[in-house]
Image: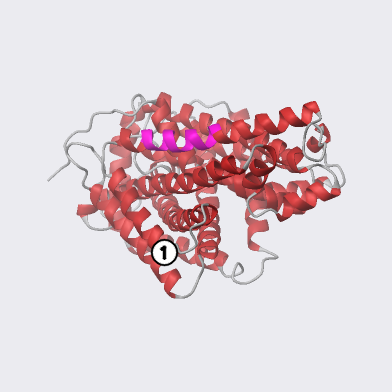
Amino acid sequence: MSNPPRTRKLRLWEALTLSVGLMGPTLAMGLNGAGVAATVGKAVPLVFLLGLLGVGLVAYGFWRLTQHFHQAGSVYALAGATIGPRAGFFGGFALLGTYLAFLVCTLAATGVFAQAFLHALGIRSTGPWVAVALLAAVGVTALNSRDGRTTARTLLIVEGIGILAMLVLAAVVMGRAATGSAPRHQSLDLSVFTAGGTTYGAVMTATVFAFLSWAGFEACASLGEETDDPKRNIPRALAGSVLLTGGLYVLMMFAQTIGFGTDARGVREFGAAESALSSLSGQYIGTWFALVIAFTAVASAFAAALSSSAAAARMVQALARDGFGPRALARTHPVTGAPTTALRVCGAVAAALAAVMYGTGAGAFDTYYWYATLGVLCVLVVYAVAGVGVIVFTLSGRGRIPRWELVVPVAGLGYLGFVFLQQSTGQRAPYTYFPWIAAAWCLAGVAVVLFAPSLTRRIGARLAGELVADAQLPAPNRKVPS
């Protein structure tokens, strides 16, 4: 039975919240600064400013392509319509690996931060972290099975509270630094936007850590079939998610850097902080606000899992619709339009992987970082496919994109290569294994394309029939590969 026609319901801000939720800005602002400080000292805000420029180069491809195409498969449809069905499936399969890995790591993060919050309240007996992760898996599946607006509003509330708390902390830190009432008389030191005592080579290397904070910005592209006026609102949501989080990251890294202090002692404390935001909250406002920050970390991890689940399920739905997997995975709820079967399968797979990690003795933090690394390695491949797609599309002349703009995706591909090289070399075990695991997943997608030609034909027929017609563009002058 075919699915009933779906009414577009999501608005611009609702699509934007899926990308913001998947990036988990509250988590990124709290976790990613310390590692950068340990590498480049006080130049943390400069690193994140340059990281914003790098992710902007990469985001350009998605921004341009979603002005012409919109489907539930995100890069699966974008690459398929521009490069060809084989590339579309390869990109979509890699993206599915990204979202599943992000779902596992954010479930683990929910367990870790929930236990930390309970410990801060004085509750020591909290049980295994995997129990919280499994409950979170059930919760995100249930919420995502409802109307898409329920997910969007949940994400808006959760991340909105976290961002508001961050802004309050930033205002207090900068206010006290400006008036000379900071704990150690820290000042508003604008030299943090220069290399300072480090080199620009070290700064550029550190932008890799900053870049990871934006992983998942493209999630709203998977809502192309559920968003009102998608060729207008999805590109705006993409640009808005990158710019909004970019401004927040730079602001919060500035506040954290001056909050700890730009002298040797402050840089050392920032680099060694396990929870930089909680430490600053206790110093500048009080213990009660540190508890608020700790709670927002739990909520943000859950929100990121909610976004990961929604994006993964829509990727599964798009693949199943073209014959990769049981047709049941392509079904949507007749009322809410949610891909309920795909949501349950993704939730079950992520829960099982989390349980396996716990069963092998892995801690929640290890599970978080290991799967986050796997997800990032896969998403770098996805971003590269999208970059190639916009280059091919521009050269074809079908979208009437000025050719001088090719410099942007070419520069983005160069930056992606730099990030991938930094993530794949000079690492210690078990991180040395992760590039091979990510490569094995992506190569599995290549194998499917090579040994299932009928799947490629179905993808090509649908993309040629639906996407090109929908985009009101001339069809590409090539045959569908057999």
- Disc 1 packing (10 Å; few <14; some 14–19; many ≥20): many
Query: Can residue 406 be seen?
Result: no
Residue 424 image offset from top left, x and y in percent? 63, 62
Rendered-image quadrant of the C terminus = bottom left
Residue range in magenta is 152-164
Instruction: Give the vertical position of 187 relative to 338 (above or below).
Output: above
- In the picture as drawn, the residue positioned furthest to the left comes out as 1
Residue type, label 1: Val
Say which of 441 and 105 sits in front.
105
Quarter location, residue 176 = top right
Q: Residue at x 35, y 65 (%)?
A: 352
Say which of 159 and 152 sits in front.
159
Query: Can residue 266 be seen?
Result: yes
Residue 18 image offset from top left, x and y in percent? 42, 38
Q: Residue at x 70, y 36 (%)?
A: 255
Q: Is residue 119 left or right of residue 262?
A: left
Q: Is residue 294 left or right of residue 155?
A: right
Specify the principal SS of the magenta part: helix
- Mark 1 residue element: helix
Q: Residue at x 44, y 28 (%)?
A: 67
Say which of 297 and 232 sits in front.
297
Q: Say how many tags the image has.
A: 1
Instruction: Give the vertical position of 269 relative to 334 (above or below).
Output: below
Residue of label 1: 130
- In the picture as drawn, the residue positioned furthest to the right comes out as 197
Q: Is residue 276 left or right of residue 312?
A: right
Quarter location, residue 247 = top right
